Amino acid sequence: MAKAELMDFDKALELFEPVLGFEVHVELGTATKMFSDAPNPAAFGAVAAEPNTQITPVDLGLPGSLPVVNEQAVRYSISLGLALGCSIAESSRFARKNYFYPDLAKNYQISQFDEPIAYDGSVEVELSDGRSFTIEIERAHMEEDAGKLTHVGGATGRIQGAEYSLVDYNRAGVPLVEIVTKMITGAEKDAPELAKAYVSAIRDIVVALGISEARMERGNLRCDANISLSPRGSGTLGTRTETKNVNSLRSVERAIRYEIQRQAAILAAGGTIIQETRHWHEDTGVTSAGRPKSDADDYRYFPEPDLLPVVPGAALIEELRAALPEAPSLRRRRLKEAWGFTDLEFQDVLNSNLLVEVEQTVAEGASPAQARKWWTGEIARVANEREVEPGSLVSPEHVSELIALIESGDLTDRLARQVLEGVIAGEGAPHHVVDARGLKVVSDDGALIAAIDEALAAQPDVLEKIRDGKVQAAGAVIGAVMKAMRGQADAARVRELVLERAQQ
């Protein structure tokens, strides 16, 4: 794949105005699929199943099979629409979206077109410096997910260069809500950060509602990022591209920045932008061409003849409105106060996009300070090295358990980092790693004193130096003891014992 020419980001913004738009797909965590009673692979706690084992005739589009709407998916969709500040349609209907889907056997997707379940909303997004930006929501509509293709034989796992492809229909029919924004202007240099902050805000809302795990690395939440450039001051819209299925917050930010630089270079050289889908490559940090982007007319939408309109009724809408959790902005203020964080400490959590992980870790019993320390410190460091989201490495439950082992004195911070390494490597929960690797702190004073005596025997002048007031001399003994105990001693306790010996 030839590397595209890029323009300097600041230079691109001198010449062009970015126009954004986002389509975020949220897999709903219902027990069964959108239109069948097959188990939903996106359900909370769902275990990965063998390919093509969680399917029914409806999912495969077999003749004579008829779809039935999942009531819980409708309730979840209404709740999400309300949380986005949308109006809920008194009546909405499903439509068939037609084009060749290799991973939807019936060759059309059941979606919503001109009558979505929710419309006309807005989301307040907060940038890292505290500024707010309002993003208007055009619609949120219900649909079904497609299956999954696995491309075999190529070097990259993508269709280019693959020898053949395998289809897994387990995901086909998983209930989705697609959230479509209105055109976003005025973001300017903040466009990449705004993209990341918007998707993060959607994730926070979805998690707060309890309707999806919203794990981007698992595909529970995916973003299609639209971007076009207008010559500055022209008032004319440019041709847009749509970068598909970006599955991490970091990637959303990087993809927007890359497309601005790529499109600016093409336009400045007198070229034209092709209206197309593009694929984001996490490993190389570039996008590549997908397929020409279709307009609505190309999909030949028509009403789904096998499904009645969805008419929720005012009572149901008000019931769901009354059950909405607090708004994310209010939640952030409440958590900051409850955790006792300074502005800088809380902003550190927000800037790292780790509010959900820290909150869940605290809910598991960890102290807020320790939860922040581990998520924004060691876990974030490892995630940055591997270029993945921190939440994909370790669960809040395991982080809370790790912190409990530290606070109980069973682990030092140094040992805890080794335990975390084992958890990330898939060796099990923290206590399993401690047992398997033999990492527990040695708390037996007898064993520590024996190691101290051995160290003092090798350095007989240390006790005299300490007794003469040169307390820093104890450091050599402490270091020798820690080495002998393979780092599994409590350095503070070793120091206490060394000083006690000096008084004898």
Image: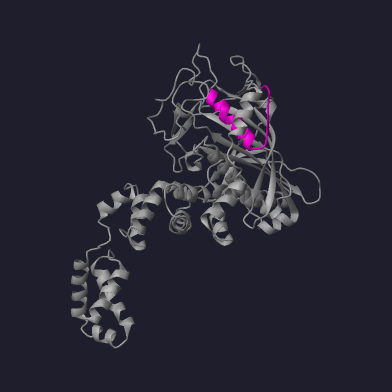
Horizontal and vertical percent for residue 482? 27, 69
Quadrant in the rendering for residue 481? bottom left
Q: Nearer the viewer, residue 136 or 232?
A: 136
The residue most toward the top is 64
Q: Is residue 271 above or below residue 470?
A: above
Residue at (31, 77) in percent of width and height: 475
Membership of 425 in magenta stretch: no
Q: Nearer the viewer, residue 81 or 7?
A: 81
Classify the position of the C terminus by image quarter. bottom left
Q: Is residue 91 above or below residue 121?
A: above
Residue at (66, 24) in percent of width and height: 314
Horizontal and vertical percent for residue 404? 36, 54
Q: Is residue 475 above or below residue 409?
A: below
Please give the range of residues in magenta: 71-91
Q: Is residue 386 above or below residue 159?
A: below
Number of numbered discs present? 0
Horizontal and vertical percent for residue 387? 48, 52
Membership of 75 in magenta stretch: yes
Horizontal and vertical percent for residue 413? 36, 62
Residue 290 in view of the camera = yes
